Image: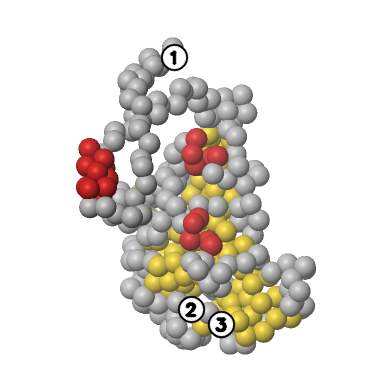
Amino acid sequence: MLFRFVTFVLLISGILAGQTPLRNSGEPMRLPFTCTEEEVQSVGLVCTEEEPCSIYLELAGIAIAGRKVFVAGNLHSSSATIASILLASDDGGQTWKEPSPRVRGAALEAVEFYDLDHGWAAGEVQYPLPRDSFFLVSTDGGSSWRQKPVAEDGGPGSLQRFWFDSAQHGEVIVDAGKRNRSGRYLDYESETGGDSWMLRSTTGELPKLKHAPASMENPDFRLRAADNGKAWEVEKRENEKWVSVASFLIEVATCKIKAAEAKEPPPEPVMVKDADEDKDYVEELKLGDPKAKAKPATPKTPAKKPGAPLL
């Protein structure tokens, strides 16, 4: 059975690989987001002219691969997570693009690169409740990503932390919640670079990652909310100072969806009878088929014309 969270892998408005990148002019950049009724309603939002919905950006993780910078997070309203976000810059922060489609209703919690080629971004579906933890896996330096589940059949819980100590071996901890019978925290291990995962243990206490360093934070790059609270800053350490590499506006859109006009359902199609149907049946009778039964006559009635649409 295909894992459940695949049904949530749907594209929503955003910049993808090959499209025009965002250019850093020194001012906070605004991620594109198009407010459509389908997109906001898919995560339970009702955004109207009277009660609009503000859409915000949250950045949660950063990773470096040579000159490439990757940041991960999500778009959300005040009450629901809209979609995951993965941003990448190949030139130290001058231009940015989204190398992987947004995953509707999901958030990315962290991103890591082991070397210049192998990288992972991980999170879970958060709407309506945290569940179905997954990885975005790259083996070409972040140019392309493929989505892989932690558990094939999905399940409740949110990703707590992960770490890869080689291009193939990694470990992830998932919080399945207090009500999980086998234990709240699930410890998974991968020997396939994140393409597949095996459950190794469950425990009631948050375990440590066996091969992770004491601090998993990048010492030379960080994410920080600007002092005015309106932007996320991507910063690089230069000697004893932190210098801004790029910044992104926190509020990306305000959705105001007009009420859809009521539409009359389309008329029912007129069924056209296959002319060969009666011919085949008559041939069966001529051949003396013992299983053939008398076929009731079908009264012929004129087809009704579809009514004019209501104004």
Q: Earlier in the sequence, mark 2 or mark 1?
A: 2
Helix, strand or loop under label 2: loop
What residue sits 58% from the left and 64% below the top? 132
In the rendered structure, which amino acid carries the disc numbered 2? Ser
Residue sitting nearer the eye, 86 or 45: 45
Q: CA distance from mark 2 to mark 1?
A: 55 Å
What residue sits 26% from the left and 40% below the top? 278
Residue sitting nearer the eye, 226 or 309: 309
Q: In the displayed orientation, state which residue is furthest to the top.
A: 311
Residue 188 appears in the rendering: yes
In the rendered structure, which amino acid carries the disc numbered 3? Met
How crowded is the residue under tag 3: few (<14 C-alpha within 10 Å), some, or many (20+)? few
User: In the figure, 294 relative to 137: above or below?
Assistant: above
State the residue position of label 2.
196
Residue 220 appears in the rendering: no
How crowded is the residue under tag 2: few (<14 C-alpha within 10 Å), some, or many (20+)? some
In the rendered structure, which amino acid carries the disc numbered 1? Leu
The C terminus - image quarter = top left
State the residue position of label 1.
310
User: In the figure, 126 relative to 50: above or below?
Assistant: below
Q: Position of residue 136 (x, y in %)?
A: 45, 67
Q: Earlier in the sequence, mark 1 or mark 3?
A: 3
State the residue position of label 3.
198
What residue sits 45% from the left and 22% below the top? 264
Q: Is residue 100 left or right of residue 124?
A: left
Q: Position of residue 130 (x, y in %)?
A: 64, 59
